[in-house]
Amino acid sequence: MTEAATTPTQSKEQPIRASELDPKFKYELQKIHGSDRILKCFQCGTCTSDCPVARYSDSYRPRTLIHMAQLGLKDRVLNSDTLWLCAACFTCTDRCPQDVEVAAVIRVFRNLAAEKGCVPQVFKDQAASLLETGYAFKIPELRVKKRESQGLPPLPKGNPENVKKTLKGVKFIEKIQKPAGDKQNGQ
Ligand code: SF4
Ligand code: SF4
């Protein structure tokens, strides 16, 4: 009996089903600035081998995400938590022999995932903090007091109203509050 096809880093427990393939996905990506050269990728693996995050992660592989997108595994790509591990250091973009803007491709995947509400809770919490205080991280009261006790100047006040105004145009608040899409094929 023939073995079911699997994506490169998937275990054999996750076979690709024809029903989950979206053949138009790669063409959609070609029309988006940043992922327009995705079909130029010939899977050499340079991006993954030079990626500092992939070096320390068992699951984050930019080449694999691009391969999955080329195959049409749209839901798997957009539901993948590993997408959010990219540190946007651009090493992959600098080294790709095909001039694929790998870091930008990952950014496009994230934007599409955010449209579906697929954003890890940790980033939703950071976004909520940004909207509430103007800072991505809430500064603990203890830290503020410690600064005072050390004679350090107070931290500048955040301006959440300005943050909200800036982010209004990209519908940031709506996207962050959107419930996560179905993770039918999540990995
Ligand atoms: S380095 Fe470029 S061509 Fe090679 S696998 Fe990565 S994206 Fe594809
Ligand atoms: S931009 Fe992201 S995918 Fe590219 S090398 Fe840096 S961490 Fe890896």
Image (tube, grey):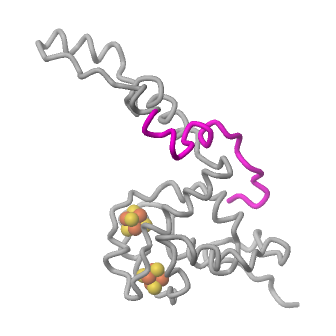
Q: Is 123 placed left or right of 10 in the picture? A: left
Count of numbered marks:
0
Q: Of all residues shown, which one is farthest toward the left?
A: 151
- Residue shown at 66% from the left, 57% from the top: 79
Q: Position of residue 177 (x, y in %)?
A: 64, 36
State whether residue 42 is above or below residue 160. below
Q: Looking at this rendering, what residue extends furthest in the right direction?
A: 1
The foreground one among 63 and 30 is 30
Q: Is residue 69 visible?
A: yes
Question: Start and end of the magenta stretch?
Answer: 165-187
Q: Quadrant of the C terminus?
A: bottom right
* Residue 150 locus on image (x, y percent): 13, 14
Q: Is residue 94 left or right of residue 160?
A: left
Instruction: Please indicate whether residue 146 sits to the left or right of residue 8 in the image.
Output: left
Residue 59, relative to residue 5: is it above or below? above
- Whether residue 180 appears in magenta in the rendering, the answer is yes
- Which quadrant of the view contains residue 69? bottom right
Residue 164 vs 71, above or below: the answer is above
Magenta region includes residue 24 = no
- Out of 36 and 162, give the one closest to the viewer: 162
Instruction: Tell me the residue at 32%/70% (across/down).
Output: 91
Quadrant position of ligand 1 = bottom left
Question: Can residue 55 be seen in this snapshot?
Answer: no
Residue at image location 79% in from the left, 57% down from the top: 184
